[in-house]
Amino acid sequence: MPRRVFTFLPGQGLELGNLISTIGALFMFVAVVIMLINIIWTTAKGERVSSDPWGDGRTLEWAVSSPPPEYNFKQLPLVRGLDPLWIEKMDGKKKE
């Protein structure tokens, strides 16, 4: 297959493939532009987050600071169920 589009002869059946490839390249270009805008926007105006950016992280990796200390946990946490950290967080948020 020739390298340059202008050397393609009419009727070779390459038109549809080239059109699909061009449309895909345009979609990728738009996606990269959106990503770059998002990176610039969040760097300039984004709010700082805490150790748990989700606010209600369900697993133990959200229980330590970010970046985590070398030892990770001061003592090995006792896991009593599927979502122990989330249950403890929700118990603290209950309005009684």
Image: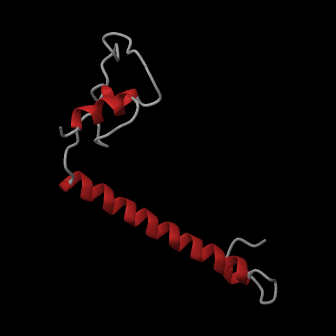
**Rendered residue at 81%/83% (across/down):** 12
Colouring rule applied to residues = secondary structure
Residue located 19% across and 40% down the image: 95
Residue 64 pos. (x, y %) = 30, 25
Residue 45 falls in image quadrant: bottom left
- Left or right, 56 with respect to 18, comes to left
> In the picture shown, does residue 92 fall above or below 18?
above
Residue 65: where, in percent of width, then height?
27, 27
Specify the quadrant that holds the N terminus: bottom right
The residue positioned farthest toward the top in the image shown: 75
Can you name the residue that lies furthest to the right here? 12
Across and down, in percent, residue 57 comes to 35, 37
* Count of marks overlaid on the render: 0
**Considering only vertical position in the picture, is 72 above or below 45?**
above
Q: Residue furthest bottom?
A: 10
Left/right of residue 7 with respect to residue 32 in the rendered view: right
Residue situated in front as seen by the camera: 71 or 76: 76
- Comparing 30 with 65, the one in front is 65
**Quarter of the image holding residue 88?**
top left
**Residue lying at 38% horizontally and 28% vertically, measured from the top left:** 61
Quarter placement of the C terminus: top left
Q: Nearer the viewer, residue 86 or 18?
A: 86
Judging depth in this view, the residue of 56 and 93 nearest the camera is 93
**Horizontal and vertical percent for residue 8?**
74, 82
Residue at the (31%, 55%) spot, across then down: 39
